[in-house]
Image: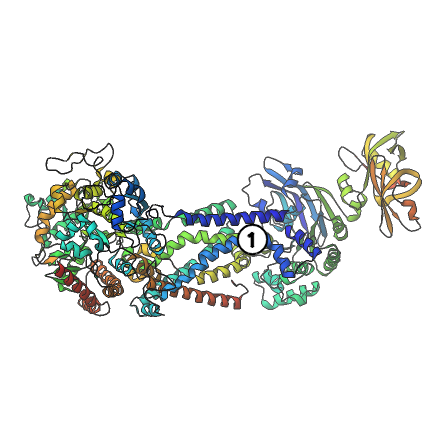
């Protein structure tokens, strides 16, 4: 329903213990994690240089490890946290100093934050009642939302009498009943068990089709991020690491952190690799074997004017393939996942994971302790500068 | 493992609790002295321990007796007093009598809480309670239950006390219960100070200023001296002048307090004001007039007086705070800058910083020419000062010991402090005790309170004449009373003495008297602070007195008891 | 953890009946509880047999309670009390003082705790709370002294009143001033202290609920009404039951200290009357015990009514 623009947003928690803000900070950012954050004279910087344009009806996911500032950012958008610096627009309106209720947003909380003494109906109707919406209209809207979420039969119950998944639906219902321009969700699925989580994830995708609104969704789970987001914002230590579609961040991680964070199992890294430049052609030496790079990669390296030297090579486990002529690795662990096999290999100093399809494999060849050969295609390889951690290609 | 530890801890806690409980029981165990005296009967005491009581200056027991026999006496004590065991007079008494008394001292406030517990704990009582503060009703009830000793059955062992009783039938009848026995030993301190609780003091300089200003008719400057007798009109004019002018010269005309007292205090109260109308009022409003128990509140003059006083209150001549202040507040406000124009009090020295600035007045002369004073029922004989429990072995010895307290020399020391600390070893040429110079930094009062246990004594005219001088302040007050109070008391009027009631009378009194007293008090303050009493209100009041508050029943009981008392006198 | 392990052990051995097993499991706790039970029994239950005094003719300390000296008189002492001229005034005074005190005093700590909880600065709230708790520690005698200083004839209030052109009022001598002074000073002493329990309950409120309410558009006040107040409601109803149970249980000390001739008409309460009858003057302890027992019975009846009512209308009750 609305575009959202964040311009160079910054959040600083002043150093004095006296502030009430610290108490309000979400629990996913415990104090000890602060060590990663930049501490200036002003205080602890939780978020900085956060700039993002969100299109109307876009589904944005903020993802990152604990303490990366994603929740803080969301809460700044909600108006629960003051914006220390920068500008926040909803539509064309600068809302830095607009009260939360006037921002036309709604939020779903991690722990649902339902009012325990109100029935489901009253929970959902509360905001409308406060807005003095006529009773009939409230009833109509609540029932509509309940139908969408399939909780019509629970409307008279108290939250205590509901299961976790049902409570989650009520929490979402409470948010959507107001038809907000922006719907904020703060780790809404993290309190659910794995099965329910998958189910609710699907529900949210369906929900998105049913209601016209812009979503900002915070999670630390990259699977959720990948499946839900139109675009993903990956954050670390208060800084945006990369903004992009799931495909972009998976295929072209900006840096070592994004590469490691997105995708399971994690990307394999070969630390002691050498980038060489011979006769205008770049090549990379991995485990003693020189691998020539593709033309595309060559061009990119040249454009970046890369010097030869130490680099980190990253390859996703799915891009590994069995190759008796390739590198030799010893199988430490072999996990049979059904359609695929996860092999944990030790190669030189590195431990790497390879995922190979099981179709046509003789499993006894991949027992623990055996050695196998493997390789990967150079065009699926990522090169990272060990200094800046940036992706070189 | 953890469980074992938990069990051990729990058991330890339990054990601690149990030992604590049982420890409490052990604490109150009696000293073994009594039990260790297997003798029975006076004859055995005499033969074994040399018990003698006839010679009041010789030891009561021999040394063997001092070893074998001991008593425990429970007593409250003043906060500043030494432990009685450490008091010189008590040690002197032991030296003189060989009677071993162990004192169990508690503070006065604790005693009032513990009194019931002591009586309640029948198995483990002390031998006697000193400063017992027993009411007549309590004495009868415990006497009926044989809890306390009928001391009068043992008078032969108490030569001093017997002598007093023989010489003073009035004392005897006051302390004798209606069954004819004496259950408690009294304190008698007859200085003649208590009967008249008030004196009227007037600010000399202020009065002179008022007279000079011509505010008070019929009084000259020379009249302003001790003994000044003012009419109510003159007093009113005087007080009005105090009220309206800046008498103390501090620039404020509204901080002068013309007439001050402490309402319904045992002394320095409002009762003298009723004397202007010929009433000898007191706090109980009960006085003997020509042998008849009389209630002043039944007198129509009381109404007139109440209206008259209320008028002074309304006009601001009587400081309204008089009706709500405590004695401490009254005393505190008298110090420093002079605020009091006139006040009623026991004496002036404790009230104001410069007592010389105040003269003593004769009672005020009322509008109809009446001039009399309050006659209080504060008895100079306090009954119930010492009781002895009935089951005490060798009680004859204890009584002979306490009898010594009634010896004039001992009484003086009990009351004021021992020879050697308060008094010189050598008496003066008249044989009277002489006060030692005070030690540095101690006031006479402090020294007295530290070293004198007070309690059972007999100090009367005989003692004042032959044994001990009255304190200076007491003497001064006595002189003043002689001049400015006693002459104004009509001959037929006396206070109500301590009376003995039958148990039934006592029950009736306990049923009616509280409500009666409350009813009078509630109405009286309404009248005095509320502008007076109307005809109708007075009628209702009189009807209620005779009706639902049973004044006549109460009065009859007092009359009967007084008649019995008068008959034995 | 201990119990878990112990129970696992015991279950595996499966020895003894179920009840015995549970007893064994809980034995350390039961043993620890034992002293408390003993103390409560010794000091709270055992002395109850003392109410027998109320049926004596005339008890004095030292009498056997089970074998009265004057014989049993049945309900005579109670009858005497009902016929006492003071009976209705005492009932009225006690009841009014307690009811008014309750109406004023019960909501006060709730309001205070809600306000403190809604105060922006944590530090400010803490400081305020400490200040509010302070008066609780003032002893009764000192409090009465303070009342005298403030409300006496030459007290602060009257000084201010006079300087504003008013007449001095003798608050201590006026019947109409007794209840306000008594109740307001009591509440002044205890509102902060009583608020502690509510403040504790409020600290358990999920801050997320407040944030949800903020986003729902609730004002500060609406949040107090819709989030904070419901959160302490169970505590409120519990306290309500207990307060009603103690409604007529006002102590004698304060009223006694504030009593003057002028306010005796309203300041004489059941408890002060008991004190005067039972302890102060020539005493009639049987009569005083009967009055005290009567007062306790009223309290128990009130407690039962309150609890039953509360059980019926909400799910909160003492038992």
**Residue C211, can we see it?**
no
In this rendering, is residue B355 above or below B238?
above
Q: Which residue bears the numbered disc 1?
A: C31
User: Could you tell whether B540 is left or right of B70 in the image?
Assistant: left
**Residue C234, can we see it?**
yes
User: Could you tell whether B57 is left or right of A6 in the image?
Assistant: left
Q: Position of residue B481 (x, y in %)?
A: 11, 48
Q: Report the number of discs.
A: 1
Q: Position of residue B431 (x, y in %)?
A: 12, 38
Q: Position of residue A166 (x, y in %)?
A: 68, 61
In this rendering, is residue A349 above or below B311?
above
Q: Dividing the picture into quarters, in which one does residue A212 lie?
A: bottom right
In this rendering, is residue C293 above or below B190?
below
Q: Residue shown at 42%/50% (left/top)?
A: B25
The residue nearer to you, when weighing B23 against C78, is B23
In this rendering, is residue B218 above or below B435?
below
The residue nearer to you, when weighing A282 against C250, is C250
Image color mode: rainbow
Q: Residues within 10 Å of mark 1 (few under 14, many from 20)?
A: some
Quadrant showing the C terminus of chain B: bottom left
The residue nearer to you, when weighing B487 against B413, is B413
The residue nearer to you, when weighing C301 against B100, is B100
Q: Chain of mark 1?
A: C
User: Could you tell whether A79 is left or right of C265 in the image?
Assistant: right
Q: SS class of the residue under badge 1? A: helix
Q: Position of residue B415 (x, y in %)?
A: 21, 43
């Amino acid at each position: 329903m609305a575009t959202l623009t964040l311009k160079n947003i910054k959040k600083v928690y002043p150093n004095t213990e006296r502030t009430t803000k610290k108490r309000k900070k979400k629990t996913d950012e415990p104090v000890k994690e602060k060590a990663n954050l930049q501490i200036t004279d002003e205080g602890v910087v939780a978020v900085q240089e956060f700039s993002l344009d969100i299109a109307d009806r876009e589904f944005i996911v903020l993802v990152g490890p604990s303490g990366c500032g994603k929740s803080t950012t969301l809460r700044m958008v909600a108006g629960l946290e003051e914006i220390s610096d920068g500008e926040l627009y909803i539509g064309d309106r600068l809302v830095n100093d607009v009260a939360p209720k006037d921002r036309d947003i709604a939020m779903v909380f991690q722990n649902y934050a339902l009012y325990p003494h109100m029935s489901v109906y009253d929970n959902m109707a509360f905001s409308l009642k406060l807005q003095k919406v006529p009773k009939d209209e409230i009833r109509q809207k609540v029932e509509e939302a309940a139908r969408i979420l399939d909780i019509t039969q629970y409307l008279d119950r108290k939250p205590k009498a509901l299961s976790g998944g049902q409570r989650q639906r009520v929490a979402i219902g409470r948010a959507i009943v107001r038809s907000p321009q922006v719907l904020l969700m703060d780790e809404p699925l993290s309190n659910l068990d794995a099965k329910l989580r998958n189910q609710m994830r699907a529900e949210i995708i369906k929900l998105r089709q049913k209601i016209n609104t812009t979503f900002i969704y915070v999670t630390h789970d990259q699977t959720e991020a990948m499946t839900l987001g139109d675009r993903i914002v990956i954050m670390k230590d208060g800084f945006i690491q990369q903004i992009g579609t799931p495909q972009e961040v998976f295929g072209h991680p900006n840096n070592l952190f994004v590469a490691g964070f997105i995708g399971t199992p994690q990307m394999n890294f070969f630390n002691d690799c050498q980038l060489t430049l011979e006769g205008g052609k770049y090549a990379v030496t991995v485990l003693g074997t020189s691998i020539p790079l593709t033309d595309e990669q060559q061009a990119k390296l040249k454009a970046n004017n890369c010097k030869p030297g130490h680099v980190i090579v990253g390859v996703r486990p799915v891009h590994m393939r069995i190759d008796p002529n390739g590198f030799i690795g010893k199988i430490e662990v072999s996990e049979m996942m059904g359609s695929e096999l996860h092999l944990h290999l030790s190669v030189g100093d590195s431990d790497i994971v390879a995922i190979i399809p099981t179709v046509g494999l003789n499993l006894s060849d991949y027992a623990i302790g055996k050695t196998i050969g493997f390789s990967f295609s150079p065009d699926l390889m990522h090169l990272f500068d060990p200094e800046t951690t940036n992706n070189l290609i | 493992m953890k469980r074992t530890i938990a069990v051990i801890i729990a058991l330890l806690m339990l054990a601690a609790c149990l030992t604590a409980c049982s420890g409490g029981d052990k604490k109150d165990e009696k000293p073994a002295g009594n039990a260790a005296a297997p003798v029975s009967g006076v004859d055995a005491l005499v033969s074994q321990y040399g018990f003698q009581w006839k010679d009041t200056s010789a030891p009561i027991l021999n040394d063997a007796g001092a070893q074998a026999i001991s008593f425990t006496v429970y007593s409250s004590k003043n906060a500043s007093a030494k432990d009685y065991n450490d008091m010189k007079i008590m040690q002197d008494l032991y030296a003189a009598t060989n009677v071993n008394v162990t004192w169990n001292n508690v503070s006065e406030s604790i005693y009032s809480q513990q009194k019931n517990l002591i009586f309640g704990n029948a198995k483990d009582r002390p031998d006697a309670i000193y400063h017992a503060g027993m009411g007549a009703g309590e004495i009868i009830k415990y006497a009926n239950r044989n809890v306390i000793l009928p001391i009068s059955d043992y008078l032969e062992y108490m030569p001093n006390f017997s002598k007093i009783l023989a010489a003073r039938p009035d004392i005897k009848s006051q302390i004798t219960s209606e069954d004819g026995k004496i259950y408690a030993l009294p304190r008698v301190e007859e200085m003649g100070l208590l009967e008249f609780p008030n004196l009227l003091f007037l600010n000399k300089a202020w009065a002179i200023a008022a007279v000079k200003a011509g505010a008070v008719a019929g009084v000259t400057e020379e009249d302003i001296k001790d003994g000044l007798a003012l009419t109510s009109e003159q007093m009113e004019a005087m007080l009005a002048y105090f009220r309206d002018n800046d008498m103390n010269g501090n620039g404020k005309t509204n901080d002068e307090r013309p007439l001050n007292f402490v309402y319904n205090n045992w002394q320095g109260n409002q009762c003298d004001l009723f004397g202007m109308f010929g009433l000898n009022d007191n706090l109980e409003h009960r006085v003997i007039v020509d042998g008849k128990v009389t209630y002043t509140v039944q007198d129509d003059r009381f109404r007139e007086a109440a209206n008259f006083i209320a008028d002074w209150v309304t006009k601001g001549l009587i400081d309204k705070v008089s009706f709500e202040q405590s004695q401490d507040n009254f005393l505190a406000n008298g110090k420093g800058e002079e605020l009091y124009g006139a006040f009623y009090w026991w004496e002036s020295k404790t009230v104001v910083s410069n007592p010389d600035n105040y003269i003593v007045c004769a009672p005020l002369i009322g509008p109809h020419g009446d001039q009399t004073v309050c006659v209080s029922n504060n008895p100079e004989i306090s009954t119930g000062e010492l009781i002895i429990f009935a089951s005490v072995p060798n009680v004859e010895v204890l009584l002979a010991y306490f009898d010594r307290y009634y010896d004039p020399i001992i009484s003086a020391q009990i009351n004021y402090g021992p020879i050697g600390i308060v008094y010189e070893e050598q008496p003066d040429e008249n044989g009277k005790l002489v006060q030692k110079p005070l030690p540095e930094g101690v006031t006479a009062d402090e020294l007295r309170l530290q070293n004198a246990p007070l309690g059972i004594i007999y100090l009367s005219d005989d003692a004042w004449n032959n044994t001990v001088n009255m304190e200076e302040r007491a003497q001064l007050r006595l002189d003043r009373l002689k001049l400015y109070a006693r002459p104004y008391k009509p001959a037929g009027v006396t206070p109500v003495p301590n009376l003995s009631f039958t148990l039934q009378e006592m029950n009736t009194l306990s049923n009616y008297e509280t409500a009666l007293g409350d009813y009078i008090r509630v109405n009286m303050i309404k009248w005095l602070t509320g502008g007076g009493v109307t005809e109708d209100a007075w009628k209702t009041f009189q009807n209620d007195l005779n009706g639902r508050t049973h004044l006549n029943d109460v009065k009859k009981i007092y009359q009967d008891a007084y008649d019995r008392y008068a008959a034995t006198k | 953890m201990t119990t878990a392990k112990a129970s696992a052990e015991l279950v595996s051995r499966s020895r003894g009946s179920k009840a015995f097993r549970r007893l064994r499991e809980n034995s350390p706790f039961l043993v620890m509880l034992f002293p408390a039970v003993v103390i409560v029994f010794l000091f709270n239950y055992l002395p109850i047999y003392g109410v027998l005094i109320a049926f004596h003719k005339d008890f004095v300390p030292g009498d056997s309670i089970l074998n009265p000296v004057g014989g049993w008189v049945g309900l005579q002492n109670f009858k005497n009390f009902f016929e006492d001229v003071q009976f209705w005034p005492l009932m009225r005074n006690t009841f009014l003082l307690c009811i008014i005190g309750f109406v004023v005093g019960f909501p006060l700590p709730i309001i205070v705790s809600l306000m403190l909880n809604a105060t922006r600065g944590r530090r400010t709230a803490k400081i305020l709370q400490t200040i509010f708790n302070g008066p609780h520690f003032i002893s009764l005698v000192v409090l009465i002294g303070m009342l005298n200083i403030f409300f006496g004839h030459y007290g602060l209030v009257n000084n201010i009143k006079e300087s504003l052109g008013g007449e001095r009022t003798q608050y201590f001598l006026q019947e109409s001033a007794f209840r306000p002074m008594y109740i307001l000073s009591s509440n002044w002493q205890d509102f902060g202290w009583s608020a502690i329990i509510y403040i504790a309950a409020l600290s358990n409120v999920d801050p997320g609920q407040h944030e949800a309410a903020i986003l729902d558009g609730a004002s500060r006040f609406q949040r107090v009404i819709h989030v904070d107040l419901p959160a302490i409601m169970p505590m409120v109803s519990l306290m309500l039951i207990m307060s009603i149970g103690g409604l007529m249980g006002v102590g004698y000390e304060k009223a006694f200290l504030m009593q003057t001739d002028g306010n005796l008409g309203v300041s004489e309460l059941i408890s002060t009357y008991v004190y005067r009858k039972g302890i102060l003057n020539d005493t009639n302890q049987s009569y005083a015990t009967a009055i005290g027992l009567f007062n306790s019975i009223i309290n128990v009846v009130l407690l039962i009514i309150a609890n039953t009512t509360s059980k019926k209308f909400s799910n909160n009750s003492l038992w």
